[in-house]
């Protein structure tokens, strides 16, 4: 049987899906739509209620991605991986003829890839009997550079019904998508260009310009561009990013610039068509800032504040214009380019930006005026300098595998106040990362200077608290009378302190007040889509969850950073590894972390030490060894932990294969350093920021070393390296023995006793049964009695705390700790009005006020790692990790453990296979649990009540292990007795 879906039908069902989450609610929707006289909605809902004809039932394909991106351009992975989702067309969401059965699973698939222009087929996977819809590797002819491809999927369900696309359709239908390659290893014609050589930073931002005659018969145009620094390109005066679908910023992002930089590809066809037609010449102008490459962030901790990556920023660009006859003309950066200083007088990631609008007109002319006329106006035009050093030749220019950083959201002021000293304090009500937009509407002298400082908190006297920024000036200086928003920097802030806002302007405006018309802000972060939500009956916990998500938004800015405000903003590896599990529930971070892992691995020292932060501009892993800033237990181990999390969430085996040898190198290096004792001593930062509960370095690093060998063994098994797995298990056994001999006394008690110490031994399997019991007893007593229901854990212990308690029969205690509101606890900051996660448990407390100012961020996500427990335990959504057939949530676990203190809780997670939902509520002495198993997956369900009390339900079967049920795709609702 073969079904062919037409676009119209697909769209009609899409409308139905949008309208209703279940056919039952369609009546309500129709009624509501009728009330609002929304004819379109009424018609769509009626259509959705109409039984779907049997011949149209099958699987539909959506969310087609290549290397995690939807229809990427400039994609240079020679063996890209495809993924998509299937869902029942006319199945789950619409009314079915009672005779029909909606599809539940994909049983086979076929992918065909063709060159878009010629239609020539380059790969036909043939029919593959498989339910997998993710991580499908391309195996066709070698891909060609600068070539667009289409790929289409045909799928078969369990009844043998085939769903495929109708290739004549031109609309947005389900089954075909595209991707386009970029350089794919072919050399660039463009050269690196920059200003006159110098090695100073905080310099005026140069504005480069290149031009070419316009191309009347252009059919397609692409800009390929990158910088060692930050760039912003304009074509004939129009900013390119916004022309190609939204404003992107901080490009090309931060990578290990010693080895690589990413280029971006922009489709500028439309822009050229719209604007280029009127111009005789196409003018490409590019602003080039110091950014991560040459600004203070790459100098601060170097000897004598010297540049590290390179002295000054450079960039390269190629504009490719394809003509009707297929030939391509190019504009490339070379010695013919010119530059002058732009109106941006200074821009730096730590210090902020200084913009002089009195020079703005010159910038505007520069972008579109013919050169001959420009010369008359602007005496300061200089020739670009070509840079061709060996160091630059070693920098590979690679495709953008990560996500673009974008302006994601606009925030309006929640309050505006004027202090006695004339400074305006603007409160956005939310701590976040981004920049402000100021507008004076011309009501100022043209050389009026506005100075805007950024702070996360206020001092008790209402002034801006900026002490925690350390040396970061984090200031916008704007000279002018219109509007401005910084371009090449970002700030972590909730409040602005604005000085120099004009108090009056001429007779017509003797008294000017700053209002919300004058200022708003844009939150800037990597464009990850949110894939998870959590909500429950306890408002404080809901706020904590929102704070965690804001912490993620604030610190996912091309690299996962520790904090966004002070003079740091680095990709600290422990922060990353502890948060990654929660982060990958909250958002689709596959591309984001994949990109970062490449840099982490490039920064590994020659001996094997992964750095404390990546990118590692100071080459500290190499030069500092196991000292501060060098490699460190718990930090460097991100090299194993983050790839594993990508595997468990997205089924990504490639990151494991790609980096396994590096992982082993790190482990072997530590083993060698231990001199055969298996006692390792790298834990430079210990259990960072714990509450008076320090552990010795050897304790932390030996425990972590043991755990990482266990993890490496699991990884080895997933990628089929059994011998390596055995070797790792042997090292684990030896380390465990060494650990016990050194850290346990003859009574089976730990010699170093802290909450984190016990969490390590329990979670990492470092003890025998008796020792285990002792450790757990200590943990419970320390929490409940010694610390009166408080935690004492730091960065490394905290992420384990609730899970280990839960796994050891202490789920009630875990809930109590989570819901604790007094200091120190997760909720204490929430009770104090926090809108993000704080770096320290005591970043601020009522008794002592602000914490240690030498390191006190109010936007640090590390302690937000607890959010994984919301998904995994409160709502019970979890991956099954060691069964290759389960990867990527093809098969997953549902096992909520409702806490007595909560009346209800629910979460959803958009897995690679589709949306999983789980929500429970206590109602009249019973527990109502609703959950959704997406199409083409199976859930292993453990009910929060005795298995024999579970009522029968279609789609639910009991396994031999009687407490585990298998649930087929569908929606379920159970009323259960309370335990
Ligand atoms: C960072 C941390 C980081 C730590 C290492 C701090 O300055 O902000 O989050 O992990 O240093 O000790």
Image: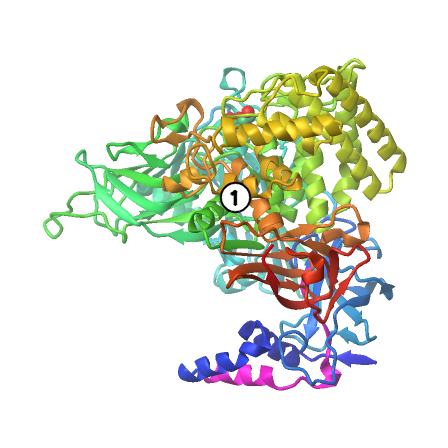
Q: In the figure, 655 relative to 56: above or below?
A: above
Assess whether residue 42 is covered by the magenta stretch. yes
Give the residue drawn at x 68%, y 76%: 91
For the residue pair 947 and 651, the one nearer the viewer reads as 947
In this view, the residue farthest toward the top is 675
Q: In the figure, 621 relative to 7: above or below?
A: above
Q: Is residue 70 left or right of residue 836?
A: right
The magenta span reads: 39-64
Q: In the figure, 484 relative to 890: above or below?
A: above
Q: Is residue 656 left or right of residue 850?
A: right
Query: In the image, residue 200 lies at what x, y percent?
Result: 47, 24
Give the residue drawn at x 26%, y 33%: 463
Label 1 crowd bin: few (<14), some (14–19), many (20+), radius 10 Å: many
* Image quadrant where residue 161 sits: bottom right
Query: In the image, residue 343 lies at what x, y percent?
Result: 38, 40
The residue to which callout 1 is attached is: 552
Where's the C terminus, which quadrant? Answer: bottom right
Assess whether residue 512 is covered by the magenta stretch. no
Mark 1 secondary-structure assignment: helix
Give the residue drawn at x 52%, y 28%: 792
Query: In the image, residue 905 lies at what x, y percent?
Result: 53, 55
Q: Is residue 680 visible?
A: yes
Give the residue drawn at x 68%, y 33%: 763
Mark 1 vs ligand 1: CB below 8 Å:
no
Q: Is residue 337 visible?
A: no
Q: How is the image coloured?
A: rainbow
* Image quadrant where residue 65 sits: bottom right
Query: In the image, residue 440 lies at what x, y percent?
Result: 26, 48
For the residue pair 298 and 578, the one nearer the viewer reads as 578
């Amino acid at each position: 049987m073969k079904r062919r879906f037409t676009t119209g039908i697909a769209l009609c069902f899409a409308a139905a899906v949008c309208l209703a989450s279940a056919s039952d609610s369609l009546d309500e929707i129709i009624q509501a739509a009728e009330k609002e006289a929304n004819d379109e909605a009424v018609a769509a809902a009626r259509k959705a209620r109409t039984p779907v004809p049997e011949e149209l039932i099958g699987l539909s394909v959506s969310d087609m991605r290549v290397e995690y991106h939807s229809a990427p351009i400039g994609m240079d992975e020679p063996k890209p991986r495809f993924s998509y989702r299937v869902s029942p067309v006319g199945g789950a969401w619409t009314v079915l003829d009672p005779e029909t059965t909606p599809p539940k699973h994909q049983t086979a698939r076929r992918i065909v890839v063709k060159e878009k222009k010629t239609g020539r087929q380059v790969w036909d996977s043939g029919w593959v009997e498989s339910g997998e819809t993710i991580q499908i590797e391309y195996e066709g002819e070698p891909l060609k550079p600068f070539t667009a491809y289409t790929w289409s999927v045909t799928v078969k369900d369990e009844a043998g019904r085939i769903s495929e696309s109708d290739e004549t359709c031109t609309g947005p239908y389900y089954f075909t998508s595209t991707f386009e390659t970029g350089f794919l290893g072919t050399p660039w014609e463009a050269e690196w260009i920059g200003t006159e050589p110098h090695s100073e930073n905080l310099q005026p931002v140069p504005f480069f310009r290149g031009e070419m005659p316009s191309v009347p018969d252009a059919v397609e145009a692409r800009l390929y561009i990158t910088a060692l620094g930050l760039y912003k390109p304009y074509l004939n005066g129009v900013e390119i990013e916004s022309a190609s679908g939204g404003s992107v910023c901080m490009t090309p992002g931060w990578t290990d610039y010693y080895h690589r930089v990413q280029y971006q590809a922009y489709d500028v066809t439309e822009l050229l068509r719209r604007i280029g037609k009127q111009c005789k010449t196409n003018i490409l102008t590019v602003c080039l800032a110091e950014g991560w490459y040459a600004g203070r962030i790459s100098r601060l901790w170097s000897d004598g504040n010297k540049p590290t990556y390179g002295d000054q920023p450079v960039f390269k660009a190629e504009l490719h214009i394809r003509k009707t006859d297929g030939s391509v003309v190019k504009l490339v950066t070379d010695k013919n380019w010119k530059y002058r200083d732009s109106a941006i007088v200074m821009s730096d990631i730590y210090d902020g930006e200084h913009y002089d609008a009195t020079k703005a007109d010159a910038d505007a002319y520069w972008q579109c005026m013919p050169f001959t006329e420009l010369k008359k106006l602007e005496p300061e035009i200089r020739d670009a300098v070509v840079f061709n050093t060996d160091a630059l030749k070693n920098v590979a220019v690679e495709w953008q595998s990560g996500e673009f950083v974008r302006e994601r959201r606009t925030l309006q002021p929640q309050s505006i106040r004027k202090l006695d000293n004339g400074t305006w304090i603007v409160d956005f009500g939310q701590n976040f990362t981004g920049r402000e937009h100021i507008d004076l509407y011309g009501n100022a002298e043209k050389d009026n200077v506005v100075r805007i400082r950024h702070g996360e908190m206020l001092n008790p006297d209402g002034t801006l608290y900026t002490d925690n920024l350390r040396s970061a000036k984090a200031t916008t200086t704007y000279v002018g009378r219109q509007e401005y928003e910084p371009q090449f920097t970002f700030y972590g802030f909730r409040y602005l302190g604005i000085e120099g806002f004009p108090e009056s302007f001429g007779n017509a405006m003797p008294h000017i007040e700053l209002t919300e018309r004058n200022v708003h802000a844009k939150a800037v972060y990597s464009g990850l889509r949110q894939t998870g939500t959590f909500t429950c009956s306890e408002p404080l916990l809901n706020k904590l969850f929102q704070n965690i998500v804001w912490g993620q938004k604030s610190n996912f800015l091309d690299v996962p950073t520790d904090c966004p405000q002070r003079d740091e903003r680095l990709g600290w590896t422990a922060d990353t590894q502890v948060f990654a599990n929660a982060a990958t529930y909250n958002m689709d971070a596959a591309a984001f972390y994949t990109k970062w892992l490449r840099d982490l691995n490039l920064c590994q020292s020659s001996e094997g030490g992964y750095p404390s932060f990546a990118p590692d501009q100071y080459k500290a892993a190499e030069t500092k060894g196991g000292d501060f800033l060098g490699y460190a237990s718990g930090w460097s181990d991100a090299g194993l932990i983050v790839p594993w999390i990508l595997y468990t969430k997205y089924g990504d085996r490639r990151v494991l294969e790609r980096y396994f040898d590096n992982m082993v190198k790190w482990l072997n290096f530590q083993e060698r350093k231990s001199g055969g004792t298996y006692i390792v001593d790298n834990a430079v930062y210990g259990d960072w920021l714990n509450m008076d509960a320090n552990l010795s370095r050897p304790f932390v690093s030996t425990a972590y070393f043991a755990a990482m060998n266990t993890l490496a063994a699991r990884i080895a098994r997933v990628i089929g390296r059994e011998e390596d797995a055995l070797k790792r298990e042997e090292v684990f056994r030896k380390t465990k023995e060494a650990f016990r001999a050194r850290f346990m006394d003859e009574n089976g008690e730990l010699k170093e006793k802290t909450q984190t110490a016990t969490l390590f031994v329990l979670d990492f399997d470092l003890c025998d049964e008796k020792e285990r019991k002792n450790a757990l007893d200590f943990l419970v007593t320390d929490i409940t009695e010694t610390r009166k229901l408080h935690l004492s854990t730091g960065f490394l212990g905290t992420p384990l705390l609730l899970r280990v308690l839960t796994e050891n029969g202490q789920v009630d205690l875990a809930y109590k700790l989570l819901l604790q509101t007094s200091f120190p606890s997760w909720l204490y900051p929430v009770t104090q009005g926090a809108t993000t996660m704080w770096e320290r448990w005591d970043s601020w407390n009522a008794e002592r006020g602000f914490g240690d100012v030498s390191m006190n961020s109010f936007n640090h996500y590390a302690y937000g790692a607890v959010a994984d427990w919301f998904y995994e335990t409160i709502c019970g959504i979890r991956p099954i990790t060691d069964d290759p057939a389960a990867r990527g949530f093809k098969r997953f676990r549902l096992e909520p453990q409702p806490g007595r203190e909560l009346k209800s809780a629910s979460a959803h997670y958009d897995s690679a296979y589709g949306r999983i939902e789980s929500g429970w509520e206590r109602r009249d002495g019973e527990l109502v649990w609703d959950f959704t198993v997406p199409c083409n997956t199976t859930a292993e369900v453990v009910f929060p009540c005795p298995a024999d009390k579970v009522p029968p339900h279609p789609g639910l079967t009991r396994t031999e292990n009687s407490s585990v049920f298998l649930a087929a795709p569908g929606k379920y609702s159970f009323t259960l007795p309370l335990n």
